[in-house]
Amino acid sequence: MNSNSDKALMLKVKKGELDKLGLLFERYHRGLYRYFYRMCRDKNTSEDLVQSVFERLLKYRQSYTGDGKFSTWLFSIARNQFNDHHRRSERIGNPVQFDDDRFEMPEGTTGPVHQAKEKKEILEEALYALPEDYREVIILSRYEGLRYNEIAEILESTEGAIKVKMFRAMKELKDIALSFEKEYNYE
């Protein structure tokens, strides 16, 4: 095993070489931030959740076995952290809020770059209009680059079930995006 692989570094952290956690943080904090931000759309919450994931990783380092991919284990912790945060927020009467404001384009703007930006914004808005479980599968697959078998492990499901969920999520995403295009006359 490569001494700088994620598994090797985490096994060193498990043995007490806590300075190796910094290398793992450098490798994964951006991906975790993107995951959290796409789930909740709040910069401060996303930053806090990234820190919480690494605190949990440190606290529960003895439970790491080295089986499977490190990123799968890490995103399982991240998903649990997000769910805990979401439940806590609802319990204290401060549910996670999603920005429902629609984007506005300046009138008279055209051109391929502007059209591409419009399409991207429509897709982002459509992503946030999806149910959370569909949004999560798309984020893990398309944005974080995880394979279906890894997502299945994180979500404690089967690869077949994840494929079905992804198919349904992508269909619904397409339908929502098309309705937004019609609503804003961006066809």
Image: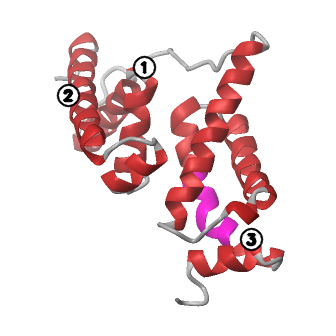
User: Which residue corresponds to the image point at 52% horizontal and 89% vertical from the top-left?
Assistant: 1
In the image, residue 117 above or below residue 23: above
Image side of residue 167 versus residue 114, left or right: left
Q: Residues within 10 Å of mark 3 (few under 14, many from 20)?
A: many
Q: Quadrant of residue 24?
A: bottom right
Amino acid at the residue labelled 1: Glu
Residue 61: percent from left, percent from top: 74, 63
Q: What element carries label 2?
A: helix
Cα separation, mark 1 vs mark 3, equals 42 Å
Q: Nearer the viewer, mark 2 or mark 3?
A: 3
Amino acid at the residue labelled 3: Leu
Mark closer to the chain start, 2 or 1: 1
Magenta-highlighted residues? 24-32
User: Which residue corresponds to the image point at 35% horizontal and 20% vertical from the top-left?
Assistant: 107
Q: In which quarter of the image is residue 114?
A: top left
In the image, residue 79 above or below residue 94: below
| Residue for badge 1 | 104
Residue 15: percent from left, percent from top: 78, 78
Image side of residue 163 versus residue 132, left or right: left
Q: Determine which of the numbered discs, if any, sits on residue 171 in the image.
A: 2
In the image, residue 146 above or below residue 66: above
Is there CB contact under 8 Å for labels 1 and 3?
Answer: no
Cα separation, mark 2 vs mark 1, equals 25 Å
Mark closer to the chain start, 2 or 3: 3
Membership of 29 in magenta stretch = yes
In the image, residue 57 above or below residue 137: below
Image side of residue 12 versus residue 78, left or right: right
Is there CB contact under 8 Å for labels 2 and 1?
Answer: no
